[in-house]
Amino acid sequence: MPSVSCLGLAGPTASGKSAASLTIAQRWPVEIISVDSALVYRGMDVGTAKPTAAELAQVPHHLIDILDPLQSYSAADFVRDTTRLVGEINQRGRTALLVGGTMLYFKALVVGLDDMPQADAAVRASIDARAGALGWPALHAELARVDPVTAARLPPFDAQRIQRALEVFEVSGQPLSSFQTGRTHNPDSPLAPEHLISLEPQDRAWLHARIAQRFNAMLAEGFIDEVQHLRARGDLSTDLPSMRCVGYRQAWDMLNTHGNTLSPAQLAELRDLGVAATRQLAKRQLTWLRSMPQRRVIACDAPDALACALESVQALLGAPT
């Protein structure tokens, strides 16, 4: 049995998590558990920067390609699946390496989940109808009146989170913030807070440049074709969590507006929209990370970032085998 049951490797999008995790896997007996709410979906490869077949063959990966985009996957699902997987991986004499940027999943695993109301399809449909008529900024203002704490941390176009916060209030009569207890650790969690390594940039411009490079690469690798294929199924829409993922929502809306053939100017507009949305995602990810004070922070834009990350792993797992 490994002395440390699992490690976490977190960070904002484009911070170098995947490359670091593969290097770790070359030196220590680990199996990777994806902490990414988009990688669970089959057929969403380019726009999620999913590991390639060659990368997946280097080390066992879990929670990748487990669902159809029609399905949903919650933080509670993640905690249940990850807790089971950590036990199975440990039984094989390996350490689970949790890698990703879905901070809600990390926080649910480390801190625990509050007993919030279940989703209500009718309430969600009503909220979506109001958003269609008034726009999400108007619903953000509505949220600010009933739950100012939650509204203060959400941008006015964060449709998914605004919808959920309003849904919780309408179903329970209580603001979402009242369910968030401020706990810092769940003693039953397989991931201890001090075992979370976080790749965070010192210079935000460095991360922004990498985000732009990644989105350009996605467009060159056929991202538009991937979204067109998903649209052609006929059973998906931007009401689904899968199609709300950053990049997919923007591409879907552009194709809805302009048809399946985008001009160079429209592609440039999509690029700008996608980069802006990804930068907002990275900002939210960093905010989440700062709420985990016991994490081990590595400056991912430093020249020795990988060496520092490996030193942190060695401090927890011992010398490479």
Image (cartoon, grey):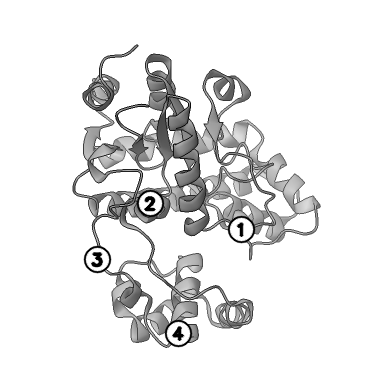
Residue denoted by label 2 = 109
Mark 3 or mark 4, earlier in chain: 4
The residue that disc 1 covers is 72
**Residue depicted at 49% across the width and 44% down the height:** 84
Q: Is residue 235 left or right of residue 294?
A: right
Front position among marks 2 and 1: 2
Residue located beneath label 4 in the image: 172
Q: Nearer the viewer, residue 99 or 126?
A: 99
Which circle's residue, 3 or 2, is located before the other in the chain?
A: 2
Q: Position of residue 244 (x, y in %)?
A: 57, 58
Badge number at residue 182: 3
Q: CA distance from mark 2 to mark 1?
A: 18 Å
SS of the residue at dot 1? loop
Q: Does the CB distance between marks 4 and 2 fall below 8 Å?
A: no
* Crowd band around label 2 with a 10 angstrom C-alpha radius: few (<14), some (14–19), many (20+): many
59 vs 70: above or below: above
Within 10 Å of the Cα at label 3, are there few (<14), some (14-19), or many (20+) other Cα atoms?
few
47 versus 93 height, above or below? below
Number of residues whose C-alpha sits closer than 10 Å to that of mark 4, classed few (under 14), some (14–19) or many (20 or more): few
Of the image marks 3 and 1, the number of the one nearer the N terminus: 1
Q: Looking at the image, is mark 4 or mark 2 earlier in the sequence? A: 2
